[in-house]
Amino acid sequence: MSAPDGRELRIVGFLCNWCSYGGADTAGVGRFVQPTDLRIIRVPCSGRIDPLFITRALVSGADGVLVSGCHPRDCHYAAGNYYARRRLEMLKGFLPVTGIDPERFEYTWVSASEGQRWQHVVTTFTNRIHALGPAPRMSGGNGYAELADIERAVQAGPGCPCHLKEVRS
């Protein structure tokens, strides 16, 4: 299901492998009706998300970016979502300075068992992005080709503080 007017916008979702990706899968298995605009980038943990990934996606032509991870105190890596929340709140305050509408970015927490919640979150966010319309295009981005680079950076990056314990061990 895309927008009521038939337009499909570029919406990127960074989803935690352990919870939110599972929640999206649960919604799919439950055959809940969902918008088709969202392109998912699966990350090991929401704590792995660098705010530059989000900024780069928006500059590269994404009309909206949704980040979703485990609920606080339920992170597979213990504190990853706390690191994410701190960074994402800072980013939300910084976006207006860059000329990007902060309404085009959202982060939330969805567990693997919350298929209905996932459906509600993604539908609400997609409807909001459609109400805002296409984002003004910025120079320097090349659309979805850039998203493959972002996904590779997520997979190859040095990690985040919540994962450094694993790397050192």
Image: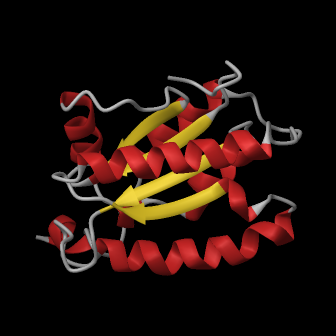
* Outermost residue to the left: 169
Q: How many marks?
A: 0
Q: Position of residue 14 (x, y in %)?
A: 44, 48
Q: Position of residue 28 (x, y in %)?
A: 26, 30
Q: Residue at position x 18%, y 73% from top?
A: 74
* Outermost residue to the top: 6
- For the question of whether residue 16 can be seen, the reply is no
- For the question of whether residue 161 can be seen, the reply is yes
Relative placement, left or right, of 24 versus 139 is left
Q: Residue at position x 67%, y 18% from top?
A: 6
Q: Position of residue 93 (x, y in %)?
A: 71, 77
Relative placement, left or right, of 26 versus 160 is left
Q: Residue at position x 70%, y 39% from top?
A: 130
Question: Which of the 4 quarters of the picture holds residue 9?
Answer: top right
Q: Residue at position x 37%, y 44% from top?
A: 119
Q: Position of residue 94 (x, y in %)?
A: 74, 74
Relative placement, left or right, of 144 versus 123 is right
Relative placement, left or right, of 71 versus 9 is left
Q: Is residue 103 above or below residue 134?
A: below
Quadrant (top left, top right, bottom left, bottom right) of the C terminus: bottom left
* Outermost residue to the front: 4
